[in-house]
Image: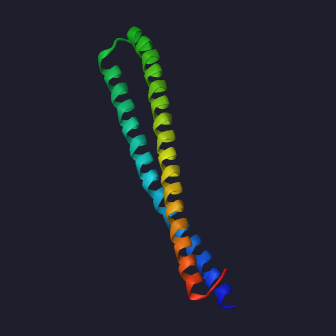
Amino acid sequence: METKKVRAKLLGAEEDWQGRIQGRLSEKFQDLYDKLLDKQDREIESQVSNLKKYLPPRQRELRQSQRKREEDILHKRFDNVRRDMELRQNMERQKLAKEFAVKKRAMESSTAKVGLRF
């Protein structure tokens, strides 16, 4: 009975720890994601305002097509950065999971020395 309680407690602690780590990582990368979106919005707004100020109507059409291409480039850059952030988050999550697994094994081995078995 004692080993079942210890095992249940250990599994509960692991799930709690993974939930907390996942929450922290999600908050961290969501903040970075939001900052990136805000920066891109400001860049696009400044480009649009500059176009409206200095160009006659005929040239606006040419500039709008150029702006569209620049927006596409920004979107591609954004997608690349987002994928990179997600990759980093997954790598960090895997690293933390491995660390927890090592700690879990250490706890299990120390409890096994005491005489408890899983």
Left or right? Give the position of 12 relative to 79: right
- Quadrant, the N terminus: bottom right
Residue under the point 33% across and 30% down: 46
- Quadrant, the C terminus: bottom right
Left or right? Give the position of 116 relative to 26: right
Residue under the point 62% across and 75% down: 11
User: Residue 110 at x, y = what percent?
Assistant: 53, 80
The front one of 71 and 54 is 71
- Vertical relation: 56 (above or below) 13: above
Q: Tell me the colour scheme of the image.
A: rainbow
Residue extending furthest top?
A: 58
Residue extending furthest front?
A: 113
Residue 52 image-quadrant placement: top left
Residue extending furthest bottom?
A: 1
User: Residue 111 at x, y = what percent?
Assistant: 56, 83
- Vertical relation: 70 (above or below) 102: above
The front one of 113 and 23 is 113
The front one of 31 and 66 is 31
Left or right? Give the position of 85 relative to 118: left
- Vertical relation: 87 (above or below) 118: above
User: Residue 25 at x, y = what percent?
Assistant: 47, 57
Residue under the point 44% across and 46% down: 33
Residue extending furthest left?
A: 54
Residue under the point 48% across and 40% down: 84
User: Residue 102 at x, y = what percent?
Assistant: 52, 66
Task: Say how many tags the image has.
Answer: 0
The front one of 72 and 84 is 84
